Each structure stands twice: as structure tokens, then as C-alpha cells.
Image (cartoon, rainbow, N blue to C red):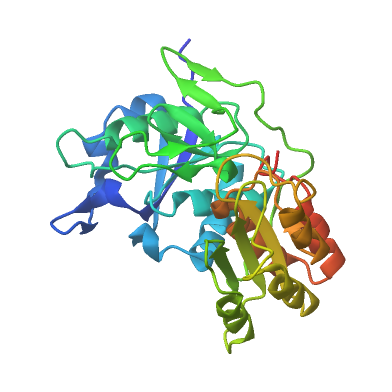
Amino acid sequence: MTQSLKKVLLLHTGGTLGMQGAPLEPGTYSQKLLERVPELAQLAELQIRVLENLDSSDVGPEEWSLIAREVERGRGHVDGIVILHGTDTMAFSASALAFALEGLDRPVVMTGAQRPLAAHRTDARRNLTDAVAFATCDIPEVGIGFDGLLLRGCRAVKSDVRSYHAFESPGCEPLARMGFDVAIAAHVRRPRGPFRCDPRFDPRVAVVYATPGLEPAMVAAMLDGAAAPRGLVLAAFGVGTVPVRGRALAPVVKRAVDGGVEVLVVTQRGGIVDLSLYKNSMVLAEAGAIPGGELRVEAAVAKLMHALAAFGDRAARRKYLETDVAGERA
């Protein structure tokens, strides 16, 4: 008896995979995927929907909301979902979907390519077929399928712009590996409640990297400006340290927090933020900043945007930011 194929919804948003020309720009290849990659029909029964055709540098909170709603609309009719997306902001979008799609009960796999599908030596064909295969598995998370690996979306970072191994998830092993079979890891998360889509994001979030010599007055000017952010991701040194002599940042952070701005601290490197470890990190905790655990900048930006839009009560918002929601913090 022939086993029926699983159903997969493929949502196209753009990216290098479907680009053409010189310079590369969005093309029409995505509309003929089954002609160009016929093996996809052997992996799943595909439904293809074109949402956008954008370079991923043009993808932001509005597009995240659109994609999340399309996932909500289609998930009840398919076993998994694949999203074609440009690589440059894929980790931001994957993080945003991880927070917007609460109680996710089936795989949502984002993928793209470093070379267009029509190019010689392209990685697009492999990434696309692997993503569809991952989407037929029991992996109810938002992931990034690239170079034979499925990475947790809210832990992924783009690590190389010139390699086919373009993504890493520091501190978090892949959810699955593509080999002769699909090897699924034991730490895949399971839904803890019913599915709910909350695709709200407040874009008024800025990122500040602590650098030697950074003038606090520059940060203060941004916070006091006409387009002042409601949230600030502070990428600190080490486990969360900042200067305390001369160009001290903590007073600016305290003024921001006291003024209603949420300040979320992440590290510029891998590892866990610990604001209790050093004097130069404790000053941020004393100023009211929120430690981000193992959040990377991409996930921190998306989570802070989501928190600002979804929680009007500040105590609830801060609790959400301090809680591990989708495996992003621990």
C-alpha cells in the first residue's frame, strides 16, 4: 500500500534563491519551483503561495506580521510550512515567528540560498529539498534549514556571507541533521499550550553596541530625540560589562529605564549574560536593565519588539522578557 505524502505549504517572500540578473534582484524563478526542482514532488504534496518578492533587507516587522498570519491561516491544512526568505535578515524573521507563533505544533522551516537557484554550483536546490524534508518531520519549532542542518530559529545567527555554511546557533545544538535519514535531536521543544498567533511588533527598538570610547551623550541624544525608541538592546562586553569610569553608560541606562524605556542587555559574544558577576555589569542591573540570558541580538530585537506591542503592563512585559519563551534564553 502506497503511503500518502505529507502536505507542506511553501510561502515565498523573496531572497537570493529566486533572484536573477546583475546586480541580483528579485526574479520569477520561485513561481516555477516544481519545474526546476521536480524532486520536491517526491517529498511532499506542495502548496505554493507567493507573499512578497523582496530582498530580505526590506523585510521587517510589517512583513513578520504578514508571514505569521499566513502561517496561522495555513497551518490547519498542512503538516509543515517552509518559508523562502533572504539570508541577511532570516535570523531576525525566524526569531519574530518563534515569538508570534505560541504553542506551535508543527514545523515552520525558513530557508534560502547564498547563490540563486539558476546559478551554477548553487546551494539553493539542496537547501530547498532539505527544508521540505524537515517540514515533514515531527519538529514543532520555527527553524532555519541550511547546509544540511535545522537550527532553532531564535538562536540562529548569520555567520558568513560567502560560505554555504551561512548560519550557526551558538550554544544550541541543531534541532535536526540531514544525512541518510533525518536525525532529530532530543532537545526539540513541544507545545506547552494551544496554538495562538500574536503577530504584533513595535518597531521602535534600537541597538547600541558598547565600544571603547563610546560617548554616553550620543546614546542620550538618541533617547531624547524626536524619534526616541521605546526599547533598547544593549550589546555589552563579555557577560554584560560596560565602562564605569569616564564614559559611564549606566547613568544613561537608568535615565532611560526611569523614563519608561526597556533596556535589554545581551553579550556581543556567545554565552550567558550575568549582570551579577562584575562591578561593571552590576551597574546595569542596578540601573534597571534586563539581563538577556543567551539571547543574541537578532532574537533580542524581535522579542523586545513583540513585548512592547503585546504587553501594555510594564511588569508583565518585563516578566515576559525575563522568561524563556521559545528556547531563546537557555
Whether residue 30 appears in this view of the structure is no
* Left or right of 205 in this view: 88: left
Residue 263 located left or right of residue 22: right
Location of residue 301 in the rendering, given as x and y in whole percent from the top left corner? 59, 59
Say if 7 sits above or below 257 in the image. above
- Say whether residue 196 is visible: yes
Q: Quadrant of residue 44?
A: top left
Name the residue nearer the viewer: 55 or 330.
Answer: 330
Figure quadrant of the C terminus: top right
- Toward which corner of the image does residue 38 lie, by quadrant? top left
Which residue does the image show at 22% across and 37% down from the upper left? Answer: 36
Image spot of residue 265 (x, y percent): 67, 57
Percent position of residue 16, x then y: 28, 50
Residue at horizontal 64 percent and vertical 68 percent from the top: 232
Q: Residue shown at 69%/75% (left/top)?
A: 252
* Depth check, front residue: 71 or 164: 164
The one nearer the camera, 107 or 91, is 91
Left or right: residue 276 compared with residue 267 = right
Where, by quadrant of the figure, is residue 40 drawn? top left
Question: Residue farthest to the front?
Answer: 246
Residue at (38%, 48%) from the top-left corner? 87
Most extreme residue toward the bottom, as rendered? Answer: 226
Across and down, in percent, residue 60 comes to 48, 64
Count up the numbered dots. Answer: 0
Q: Nearer the viewer, residue 246 or 13?
A: 246
User: Going by the image, does 179 lie left or right of 37?
Assistant: right
